[in-house]
Amino acid sequence: MSDRRPYIAANWKMHKTVEETEAFVGELLPAVAGAGDVDVVVCPPYLALKRAVELCAQSPVRVAAQNMHEEESGAFTGEVSAPMLTEIGTDAVVLGHSERRTYFNETDDALARKVPAALEAGLEPILCVGETEAERDADATESVLLRQVTADLAGVVDARLADVVVAYEPVWAIGTGRTATPEQADEAIAFIRRTVAGRSAEAADRIRIIYGGSVKPANAAELMALDGVDGALVGGASLDPADFSAIVEAARP
Ligand code: PEP
């Protein structure tokens, strides 16, 4: 771990009703009360966001959406915009998750507009990037990361680059139980940091780059111990407040 503030986010995906969110937050808040040195973020489905914001209001835990549209309003049936998220007190937004890229045709072009739109609205973007298994096997990991990071951050001015959190999520490690080795995570994250340094050395030093892909209490400490890894985006293991708070604990400096 570096001196960047650790960042641990719970991506619930399409899990948890409002009632389940209440139960989760009720258990989480006391469990992370001593972790004031870590940014702790929960990412519920849209319908549970408002309740999560209310429940976390008197705590350091922050709330993120899992996606948003790049326009403020318009004829985009089924979509939600940044001002709609900030109106209810949402703090951050996951953008470019591989499930959205794979199943919902999320493109780098759209992300190039979504990331600055989120920042402008006052949302902290958690930008996900990462290669598929076929791309890793074809030795294309760095070219994929270069393409995604360059394109997705193209609309962000240098002075705001460090306000983005980048999540390196190798697609083959998401929800599969396979975790990148510490060496693989470290190498990819170092590459992303060098790519940001191509824009601004200062931003590269400050930007948080976290790892995602089957992070669990059993492997979190090893991953968090890596100097370049500033935290984790957690899917499956974030559905259980005890497991998630154990991962938060592992990230404490
Ligand atoms: C994710 O959804 O971002 C993720 C990393 O999932 P999991 O931890 O289940 O692999």
Image (tube, helix red, strand yellow):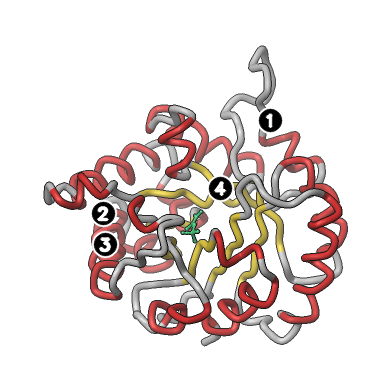
The local secondary structure at tag 4 comes to strand
How many residues crowd around disc 1 within 10 Å: few (fewer than 14), some, or many (20 or more)?
A: some
Q: How many marks?
A: 4
Quickly name the residue at label 4: 94
Find numbered disc 2 in the image and state the secondary structure of the residue it sits on: helix
Residue bearing mark 2: 195
* Residue type marked 3: Ala
| Marks 4 and 2 close (CB-CB < 8 Å) | no
User: What residue sits right under mark 1 in the picture?
Assistant: 80
Alpha carbon separation for disc pair 3 and 4: 20 Å
**Ligand 1 within 8 Å, label 4 CB:** yes
Q: CA distance from mark 1 to mark 4?
A: 13 Å
> Callout 2, which amino acid?
Thr
Q: Residue at x 15, y 51 (%)?
A: 137
Label 3 sits on residue: 188
Rendering coords of residue 215 (x, y %): 47, 69
In the image, residue 45 above or below residue 186 = above
Task: Find residue 222 and name its label.
Answer: none
Which residue is at the far front? 177
Please give the name of the residue rendered at 28% of the width and 46% of the height, measured from the top-left corner: 132
